Amino acid sequence: MIIYLVRHGETDWNRAGRLQGQTDIELNEKGREQAAKLREKLSGVVLDAAFSSSLTRAKQTRRIILDGRNVPAWDEPLLKEMNFGQWEGEMLREIRADEGHPLHDLFEQPGRYAAPRTAESFEDLYRRTWGFMNETLCPLETKYGNVLIVAHGGSGRSILNPLADVPVARFWEKPMGNCAVARIALENGEFRLLEYDSGITPSSKKSGISMQKGCQWHAFGILGEEE
């Protein structure tokens, strides 16, 4: 199986620099255009199935990419963005600048982040996204050839980072623009990153970096590592 892991297109909150989390924001015009361009890029790929976060911006991106195709598709709550609690809607630059903000470490020192009561921890995020990878995708390995997954900047990184040997301490290090694409192989129970296009620079970020084996959840292996 080849997995095409995609971040959703742009929203007005993305453009403004607001923290979205699980607040349900629709794509803006640019976001719809980004998804349409990605549809063209993937036109030569025969997609057999598709999953997306159950948030509107991810579902809209999935629908635009699949426009004109007869592909079975599912909404998947496990792929939703990280929950940032009551601070969703705040300006990210202000959170980063305020050392006393409850989410400051989440973005500035993620290896030391202790989630406040109403927000989601990295451990919980990895548990649910890799729960989807292991419990939903692994059993489908021999059923589907190419699968589209549409997620978010946080939930997408929680899948991508272990495959690129990126610890939680550097969680936000890998750029992931709107409609970024990672191509991931699942073969004999092993996930392997084949290629990555950050969606930010003109050239693709390509690598065959790491293998995650045995359809297991791998978050505990990277939590707490700092460099």
Image: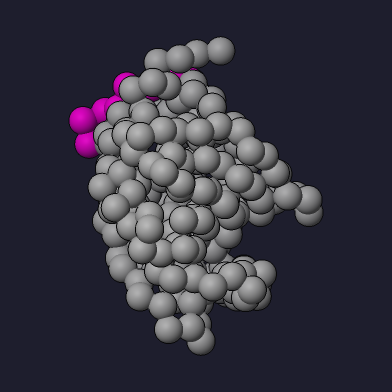
Q: Position of residue 43 (x, y in %)?
A: 62, 75
Q: Residue furthest bottom?
A: 68
Q: Nearer the viewer, residue 223 or 1?
A: 1
Q: Residue at x 26, y 28 (%)?
A: 116
Q: Nearer the viewer, residue 226 or 70?
A: 70
Q: Give the answer, above or below, for where 90 lies relative to 101.
A: below
Relative to 164, 85 lies left or right: left
The picture quadrant where one finds residue 155 is top left
Q: Residue furthest left?
A: 117
Tell me if residue 197 is in the magenta stretch.
no
Q: Residue at x 33, y 22 (%)?
A: 220
The picture quadrant where one finds residue 114 is top left
Q: Residue at x 38, y 54 (%)?
A: 141
Would residue 222 be seen by someone viewing this image from the given angle? yes
Q: Which stretch did the figure color magenta? A: 108-118
Q: Position of residue 7 (x, y in %)?
A: 51, 55
Q: Position of residue 30 (x, y in %)?
A: 61, 70
Q: Residue furthest right?
A: 202
Q: Position of residue 25 (x, y in %)?
A: 40, 63
Would residue 80 be seen by someone viewing this image from the given angle? no
